[in-house]
Amino acid sequence: MNRIEDGLVFPFPSAPELGKVIEVAPGILWARMPLPFRLNHVNVYLIDDGDGWAVLDTGIGNAATREAWEALLAGPLGSRRLTRLIVTHFHPDHIGLAGWLAQRFDLPLLISQTSYFGCLNISLSPGALDAKPYREFYLLHGLDAETTGLVSTRGHEYLKMVTGLPLTFERLVAGDTLKLGSRIFSVHTGDGHAPEQVMLYCTEEKLFLAADQVLAKISPNVSVWAVEPKGDPLGLYLRSLKAIRTTLAADALVLPGHQLPFYGLYTRIDELIEHHKRRCAAIAEACRNAPRSAAEIVPVVFHQPLDPRQMGFAFSEVLAHVNFMFGQGELEWAEPRNGVRRMIAP
């Protein structure tokens, strides 16, 4: 039975168990892979591709995920081959086992160019985020030396959880069409959560494979990273949401990268936009009382205790709001103190 929560409709009230699948539309299977984090799962999809299954996303590159794939391959996927591998973006929970799957089954990798080279860069230089310019980035915005050390090392350990990539790939570009079996999908890309993240939409059946761009109950992480300290990922993310809202059908079935599939695309987009407006308002209010560094804003936005990985995400997400607000004229830089940048709300 459908469940309606906050204007969203969930046609599948529970997720598939490990090693099993749920058919969410004719010829589209939904499976789950475990993650060793607070967000403890990632969704993968198998799409009928004629004589086999096209795979969308892989899970992270660790033993538990390989075991989950072995259970799928010995069970519900055992009677048909895998045809090709589509990866939505370069975060390890989506691309982590791409190398393993592609090599084992001789699969072509379909991916955006940005995602391919972004992952390749991390794979070749897993310690790069511990470099001096990146540590200085965290210190400049108010993290203490100990926390900076933890975020720069342990906080980025998850980025190494990939099994490498094939040496070649097939590029997916916004505006392309992709034929999988009898279905035609239009290729969309969005930024903010990950650069050039791929999403697929079947207009005829109103099926939206949304990756992490639109999730039902959580906001995807939108972060400024040290490699692009003046970036505006939040502005790009909001632009992407508005483009989805004007391009796709309101009653599309959303098949996301995490949590449950749902109906209510426009409702959820409106909620996500409002969520970020509220965060900007809270930051502005905090900066009216006194000049604040980005590190001092973290507990204004995130109220729970944070481990190094979570602190890295939280700090970088605060900076995404800060950079966006500077672009909108909602913040100004105050005089630095002790080498730390602080901002005020005019």
Image (cartoon, grey):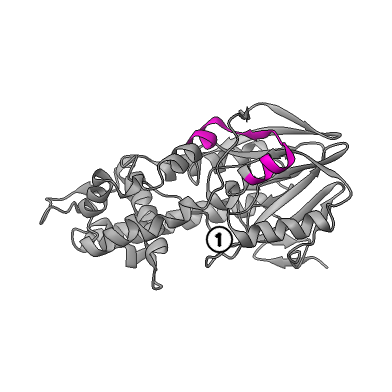
Three-letter amino acid code at the position of disc 1? Ile
Quadrant for the N terminus in the image: bottom right
Q: Is residue 11 above or below residue 86?
A: below
Q: Left or right: where does residue 331 sit relative to residue 261?
A: left
Q: Residue 85 sits in which quadrant?
A: top right
Q: Left or right: where does residue 325 sit relative to residue 338?
A: right
Magenta stretch: includes residue 261: no
Q: Left or right: where does residue 107 sit relative to residue 130?
A: right
x then y, percent, for residue 46: 77, 47
At x 73%, y 61%, the residue is: 9
Say which of 43 and 82 sits in front. 82
Q: Residue 208 sits in which quadrant?
A: top right
In magenta, the rendered stretch is 100-117
Q: Residue 241 sits in which quadrant?
A: top right
Magenta stretch: includes residue 111: yes
According to the picture, the residue beneath numbered tag 1 turns out to be 218
Q: Is residue 223 above or below residue 282?
A: above
Q: Main secondary structure of the magenta part?
A: helix
